Amino acid sequence: MTFEARIARLFAMTEETWARHANPWSVYTRFTALPLLLLALWSRAWFGWGALIPITLALAWIWYNPRLFAKPRSTDNWTARVTFGERLWLDRKRLVVPRRHRVLPNLLGGFAGLGFVIAAWGALTTVLWPTLFGLLLSMAAKLWFCDRMVWLYEDMAAQDPKLKDWVT
């Protein structure tokens, strides 16, 4: 099982949850998660142990976000294709992922993770520049990763007509 698949399992991503997460509102509002978490970590400087409340709320938002919005009426959009590609990527141990999609998503995930670590360190130490740099690095890598997931889905759907049925 891949690292990302373990995270999806931790988040209890069921078929229903994935269907709801294909809603553009779910995907776009998900980009608020890291800034909210960093703000919550930074709040330790103001609230001490009381910062556990905003940290818990930020983590709850991260878990609840894919469940919040209804299934989209149509999945013929970029954001839905992002989630379709993510599902295929999570299952890459079982599926044959085209060669050109095997390296860059891993690198982008690594850069997103590195950015998160830098940003979290900056937030916990209340130093602005590493917080902002890490946030920018993480979010840029995640956006590029999302675009790669669309490309992955489209390439795999061209090979497997059943995958084309995911777009409604």
Image: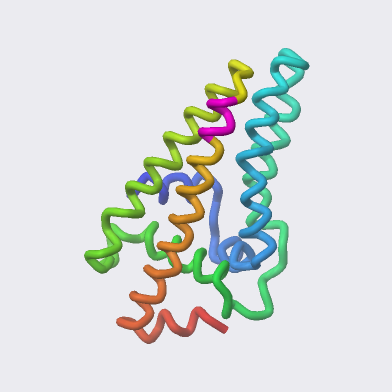
Q: Nearer the viewer, residue 146 or 11?
A: 146
Q: How far across and how far down the image is residue 86, in percent?
A: 45, 61
Q: Is residue 36 left or right of residue 132?
A: right
| Percent of width and height locating residue 129 | 57, 26
Residue 133 shown in magenta: yes
Residue 124 falls in image quadrant: top right
Farthest residue toward the left? 99
Residue 71: % across, % down: 67, 71
Residue 67 in the image: above or below residue 62: below
Vertical arrangement, residue 96 with respect to residue 165, above or below: above
Q: Nearer the viewer, residue 15 or 103?
A: 103
Answer with left or right where residue 34 lies relative to residue 157.
Answer: right
Location of the C terminus (image quadrant): bottom right
Q: Which residues are magenta?
A: 129-134
Residue 68 occupies which quadrant of the picture?
A: bottom right
Residue furthest front as drawn: 129
Which residue is at a point 67% across and 49% down the rendered structure image? 64
Q: Is residue 50 magenta?
A: no
